[in-house]
Amino acid sequence: MQICWRSFYYCKKLSFIDIPIDSKLQTIEEDAFCYSAINSFIVPPSVKKLCENAFNFCNNLQIIEINDNSQLSNINTNTFAGCTRALIMVSPNLKDNINIYF
């Protein structure tokens, strides 16, 4: 399962999205939340891939949380480009297993 290309592109009324912890979501495609008003995002454990520009220029985005049981191994180039207030919270158990590129 995936959140497709530009699914929430320019959604200025979207501030939060609640994806169940037991979700089967595996990929968040390019530009999925680009320019949206989302302010926080908890990466479901099943997600393996955050594509380029997925959260590009989400100016309200402040917290991205990646938990212990995450299957995420790579965050692609510019996934969070232009998110000047974003703080990525990664479990200490995962910090050596995730490559983050900006």
Image (cartoon, rainbow, N blue to C red):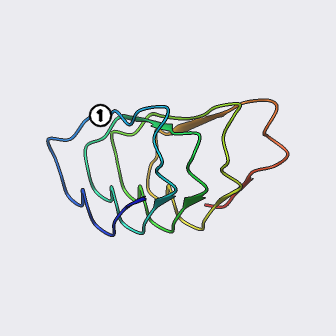
Residue located 34% across and 66% down the image = 4
Q: Residue 102, relative to residue 88: is it above or below?
A: below
**Outermost residue, left direction?**
13
**Mark 1 burial class by Cα count in 10 Å: few <14, some 14-19, many 20+:** some
Residue located 67% across and 47% down the image = 71
Q: Residue 58, relative to residue 42: is it above or below?
A: below
Question: Where is residue 53, by image quadrant?
Answer: bottom left
In front of the other: 59 or 21 = 21
In the image, residue 14 lies at what x, y percent? 20, 41
Q: Quadrant of the C terminus?
A: bottom right
Q: Residue 23, relative to residue 47: is it above or below?
A: above
Residue located 66% across and 50% down the image = 72
In front of the other: 45 or 36 = 45
- Residue type at numbered disc 1: Phe
Left or right of 40 in this view: 86? right
In front of the other: 34 or 5 = 5
**Outermost residue, right direction?**
96
Residue located 24% across and 56% down the image = 8
Question: Where is residue 93, by image quadrant?
Answer: top right
In the image, residue 29 lies at what x, y percent? 43, 66
Question: Where is residue 19, by image quadrant?
Answer: top left
Disc tally is 1
Disc 1 designates what residue? 16
In the image, residue 54 lies at what x, y percent? 43, 60
